[in-house]
Image: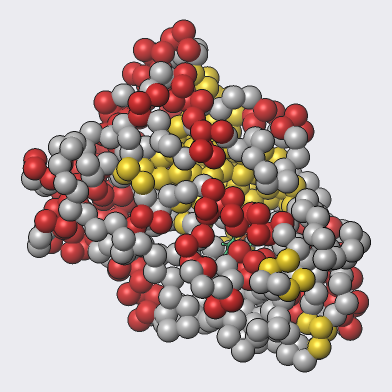
Amino acid sequence: YLGQYLLANVFTTSILHKPSPALCHKGDAMPLEMNKPFSWKKALEGADDNALAGTAMLNDLQGNILKSHGRMHSVNMFLAFDPDRREQALTFIRQIGREVTSSMHQLITTDLFKAGQTNSGPYIGFFLTSKGYDVLRKEEAKPEDDAFRQGMDGRPLGDPNRERWDPTFTRNIHALLILAADNEERQKELHKIYQNRINDTDAAVEEIGWEIGSPQLNDDGNPLEHFGYVDGRSQPLALVEDIEREKNENGGIGKWDPSIPLNQLLVRCPGGQSDLSFGSYFVFRKLEQNVKGFKEAEKELGHTLGDIDERAGASVVGRFENGTPVAKFDDEQPVKVRGNAGVLNNFNYTGDEDGLKCPFAAHIRKTNPRSDEKNSKSMLMARRGVTYGNRTDGPNDDNMDTKPTTNVGLLFMAYQSSIENQFEATQTRANKPIFNEHHTGIDPVIGVAVIENAGLTKDDQNKQIYPKIWGKELSKPTEFFGFVKMKGGEYFFAPSISFLRSI
Ligand code: HEM
């Protein structure tokens, strides 16, 4: 299975690798336009210099950054290298470099897969931490972002102390290997193959822990996070083809245009072999969800606001469970499944400037204020998270007794070009009780009560203001938070493939 994949990978890499040498050698001018979305199909046609540069970029860029790999089962293997056996570790990484999924391979095989022509095979991704670059003594190849160099621990995010994180994350992580397949058996098979390979390194490489991710789908076929809400719908899009699909098939982009420039996700890979070698900063956070606590608090909030049921939760998230935005509707609307708009994303907060429909604190309004803020798009990341943990009930079941309180949650993952301006700025805003001079309270899903605010009483500052009567009347400050617990994480960089192959 892996063999077939590798053959296909080599095939697409060699067939499609057609950059002219002048475009590819380090030090030459870079003709690729980074400040706008990018058309990979035009790049394939090879019409002009920008297109040729585009194919070179895609061949050297890891997959999953510009578009989600979409595999249902994944394992995240956290690795450490022995500094005294650096050469063996480097050999191990060079081999992985020949196996990681390139963006070009991913885009082509996904297209073929959709056309029913072939199995899209596994997705393989490889990432390094700042400490990883240090242990491998690759200082000159290390990306510059200050937050990346410092690591997640100790950044001002309101996280619990590292001693309280899960054991894997209390160790020094040097690398992350992600293996994903479309069924569980294949994912396990892949995990075994790479564990054997690690065993063969004579302890030069150690697997210090792993996390398994697998999505859960609702009846509409959309992925749900554990609190029972559709997740992963709203994404910034850097590929022209994805923007076109959003415009023509998924509800339009007139009210919310998700397009972003390439340079919001990509930065130069300092260790890459050409001017067209790019990488992306990757944030990983294990976030445990107390589902029972959240669901009980949701019911209580409904009573406090006046015997409303589903709208209480929708006010916390900003969308009803099936994804209907509460800024637009006061009740869940049916989501038509295939061949049309699906979960609505073409909306903004115009007409709701006082937060009378969607609270300012609602998770999706805090993390993407859309029309509330100029340039709000610049903070957006490519979110690639997946749920973890097994549960006996369905996320949309009503029975409170069977709802889990621990051991389930979200493996939050996101790509970006600046950790400080994107992930950290978003989490910081989630933790802030004030937004655009409104008292909003902290984000009820991910907010942590850390920042004191002079204008508000200590008691009130973290509480949220909710619509009591939708569109008409606001509630008193009401407390809702504390159901997501950070269990560990780290900042990574997804380097270019040419760097991994030549390391
Ligand atoms: C959107 C849940 C953590 C940033 C969403 C949505 C849900 C959700 C249900 C709506 C679906 C969508 O619009 O795509 C959760 C849960 C989390 C979590 C349960 C933790 C367990 C985070 C974190 C961040 C974040 C840590 C960043 C710091 C976002 C963003 C959106 C979003 C940017 C899209 C908003 C939009 O564009 O409208 N999340 N999330 N989420 N979340 Fe989270």
Specify whether residue 386 is in view: no
Q: Quadrant of residue 47?
A: bottom left
Residue found at x 63% / y 71%: 365
Q: Is residue 164 above or below residue 14?
A: above
Residue found at x 51% / y 33%: 149
User: In which quadrant of the rendered image does the N terminus lie?
Assistant: top left
Query: 45 or 238: nearer the eye?
Result: 238
Q: Position of residue 358 (x, y in %)?
A: 69, 79
In the image, taking residue 275 as reference, residue 201 lies left or right, namely right
Outermost residue toward the front in this view: 454
Q: Position of residue 397 (x, y in %)?
A: 75, 67
Q: Is residue 399 above or below residue 344?
A: above
Query: 17 or 12: nearer the eye?
Result: 17
Residue found at x 27% / y 41%: 277
Residue found at x 47% / y 83%: 255
User: In which quadrant of the rendered image does the C terminus lie?
Assistant: top left
Specify whether residue 225 is in view: yes
Outermost residue toward the top in this view: 84
What colour scheme governs how the chains and residues are painted in the rendered image of this protein? Answer: secondary structure
Q: Position of residue 446 (x, y in %)?
A: 70, 56
Query: 346 or 143: nearer the eye?
Result: 143
- Quarter, ligand 1: bottom right
Q: Is residue 149 above or below residue 247?
A: above
**For the image shown, how many numbered marks are present on the structure?**
0
In the image, taking residue 8 as reference, residue 152 lies left or right, namely right
Query: 412 or 7: nearer the eye?
Result: 412
Q: Is residue 332 above or below residue 431?
A: below
Q: Position of residue 390 (x, y in %)?
A: 68, 48
